[in-house]
């Protein structure tokens, strides 16, 4: 008989896992010393929490605005915290909340924050957090690298001290991994403690989860995406007693599905949403072209909030986001654009029929409830303690999106995820121009490509895997956020013909250098390709802005792919060499 891959003994083999109730009690006890501190924002709006302000905005049909800030340099971040708000205020516009972009290294325990850094902000004390958020009357949202990591308690304490009443990102608990850190028991345990601390606050603090950073990026069915959100809501609100606030939007390019998901997510929600993130995958052109994408997703979100106010803030992402970290003036420009677009949308709303989106929302909802119920029932039948938040979180993380959807999802997607649609379309656009004879040459060679990511962003990896499959190349799974030495070891053991690395922001040069060093030390020569966000902040930089490092990567001996289409000529060279022998 084949063993059940979801058996509790396989997923949770440890005999002495900590009880969730004990972890929650430890977190609640911390509330005696760590509570929501003074807030320039709350004083300015006259509320006790951002959730209360969100409810007021929803009741007044007032749409909140979200901006993303966080340069590596603390003083520049503090200056931009004030400057963006002040410039918008003088122009008669508003920015209500900031997502504070912490560096991924902030996820480590304090004594381990000494290694390589990315491009985000590194805060060294609760006093620094307070100094930052006091710079302007804007709600501080600590959205990334807080919950979900071994430093969850520390980062939550610091965020609370800074007056934050919106802390996340719970979605990262399920999918993100810190380089060199494999102790998921500690990461989950510290997160449960932090959630206990949040739930014990004397004011409402929103537990933020960006679904696009969690399982939703991998599911093929929107019903599974929403079902996962309902499971998170159940754990945080029913089992822990907190307030769940969801975010989505990175990969929702199709406007009907984007609005339908907004309607479906609102069903049964008792707390406001955090924000609708910008559809950054739509930024594929120059600045002028990207303004069309900005207007497209913002208008969908504005009309959605007009039709069903949920307190979600809209997020005008600067049009340079696909090239580099935007500077202060570019963040301001996007905010002013959004302010004017809201004015224009008021006249457009009567022209828009949202019934199609509402009908699709009903279909998504039905499938989401079925998925949620199937997951919880299936785990309970296998002996999991589904009343224990720690056990549920750890089991879901280890099982992963693909296995969850395979075991408990619909036999065919109820509503195909926009992420899958978009990746399939992107692959097709790149391969449609490949001549048939070249396709056949590649297919006949029987090549094997090891595909991995240097960090937690796996859409580039998924795109490459789709393209490889269409070309008859076996795509081997090299892992997500895999350490360089492990990737090199896997490459050698697999006997692959090439290594393909997708990278996101600020680590490309260091990462590919370590992979190549590992291969050379073993005396192995394998072509290494890398694409994505090929940048890094220079050590002597005084701007906190990264620069392109592609030429330096080429100098190391790797091949740079500016676009996924560059995979094809690399495969063709390998295929020709193999077919000629």
Image (spheres, rainbow, N blue to C red):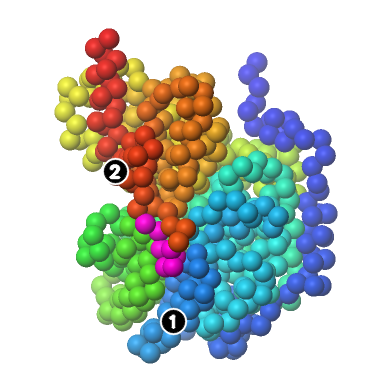
Q: Give the range drawn in magenta.
A: 541-547
Predominant secondary structure, magenta span: loop
**In this rendering, does residue 96 appear at all?**
no
Closer to the camera in the image, 234 or 51: 51
How far is disc 2 from disc 1 in space, using C-alphas? Answer: 35 Å
* SS for callout 2: loop
Q: Residue at x 37, y 42 (%)?
A: 553
Residue 509, percent from left and from top = 43, 45
Residue 579, percent from left and from top = 26, 13
Q: Name the residue under label 1.
A: 83
- Decide if residue 29 is on the left or right side of residue 436: right
Closer to the camera in the image, 213 or 447: 447
* Above or below: residue 510 compared with residue 77: above
Q: Name the residue under label 2.
A: 563
**In this rendering, does residue 114 appear at all?**
yes
Q: Residues within 10 Å of mark 2 (few under 14, many from 20)?
A: few
Q: Residue at x 33, y 79 (%)?
A: 336
Looking at the image, the residue that sits furthest to the front is 540
């Amino acid at each position: 008989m084949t063993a059940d891959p979801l058996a509790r003994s396989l997923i949770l083999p440890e005999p002495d896992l900590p009880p969730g109730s004990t972890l929650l009690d430890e977190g609640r006890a911390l509330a005696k010393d760590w509570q929501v501190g003074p807030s320039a924002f709350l004083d300015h709006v006259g509320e006790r929490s951002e959730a209360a302000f969100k409810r007021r905005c929803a009741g007044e049909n007032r749409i909140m605005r979200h901006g993303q800030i966080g340069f590596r340099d603390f003083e520049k971040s503090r200056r931009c915290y004030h400057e963006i708000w002040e410039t918008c205020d003088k122009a008669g516009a508003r920015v209500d909340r900031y997502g504070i972009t912490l560096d991924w290294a902030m996820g480590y325990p304090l004594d381990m924050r000494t290694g390589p850094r990315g491009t985000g902000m590194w805060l060294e004390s609760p006093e620094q957090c307070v100094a930052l958020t006091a710079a302007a009357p804007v709600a501080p949202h600590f959205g990334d690298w807080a919950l979900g990591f071994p430093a969850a308690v520390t980062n939550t304490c610091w965020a609370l001290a800074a007056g934050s009443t919106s802390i996340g990102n719970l979605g990262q608990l399920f999918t993100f991994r810190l380089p060199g850190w494999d102790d998921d028991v500690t990461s989950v345990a510290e997160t449960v403690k932090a959630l206990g601390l949040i739930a014990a606050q004397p004011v409402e603090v929103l537990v933020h989860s960006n679904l696009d950073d969690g399982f939703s990026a991998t599911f093929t069915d929107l019903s599974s995406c929403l079902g996962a959100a309902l499971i998170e809501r159940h754990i945080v609100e029913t089992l822990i007693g907190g307030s769940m606030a969801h975010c989505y939007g990175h990969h929702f390019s199709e406007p009907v599905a984007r609005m339908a998901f907004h309607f479906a997510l609102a069903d049964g929600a008792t707390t406001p949403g955090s924000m609708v993130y910008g559809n950054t995958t739509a930024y594929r052109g120059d600045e002028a072209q990207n303004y069309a994408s900005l207007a497209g997703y913002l208008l969908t979100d504005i009309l959605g909030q007009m039709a069903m106010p949920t307190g979600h803030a809209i997020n005008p992402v600067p049009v340079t986001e696909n090239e580099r970290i935007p500077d202060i003036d570019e963040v301001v420009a996007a905010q002013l654009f959004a302010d004017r677009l809201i004015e224009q949308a008021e006249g457009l709303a009567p022209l828009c029929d949202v019934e199609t989106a509402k009908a699709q929302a009903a279909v998504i909802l039905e499938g989401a409830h079925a998925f949620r119920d199937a997951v919880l029932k299936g785990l309970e039948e296998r002996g999991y303690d589904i009343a224990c938040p720690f056990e549920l979180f750890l089991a879901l993380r280890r099982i992963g999106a693909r296995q969850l959807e395979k075991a408990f999802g619909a036999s065919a997607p109820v509503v195909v995820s926009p992420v899958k649609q978009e990746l399939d379309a992107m692959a097709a656009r790149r391969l449609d121009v490949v001549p048939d004879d070249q396709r056949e040459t590649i297919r006949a060679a029987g090549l094997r490509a090891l595909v991995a990511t240097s960090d937690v962003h796996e859409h580039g990896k998924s795109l490459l895997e789709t393209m490889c499959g269409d070309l008859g190349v076996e795509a081997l799974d090299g892992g997500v956020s895999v350490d360089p030495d492990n990737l090199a070891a896997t490459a050698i053991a697999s006997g692959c013909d090439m290594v393909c690395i997708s990278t996101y922001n600020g680590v490309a040069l260091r990462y590919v250098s370590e992979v190549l060093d590992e291969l050379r030390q073993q005396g192995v020569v394998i072509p290494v390709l890398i694409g994505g966000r090929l940048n890094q902040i220079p050590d002597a930089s005084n701007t906190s802005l990264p620069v392109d490092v592609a030429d330096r990567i080429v100098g190391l001996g790797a091949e740079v792919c500016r676009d996924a289409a560059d995979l094809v000529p690399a495969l063709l060279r390998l295929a020709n060499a193999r077919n000629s022998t």
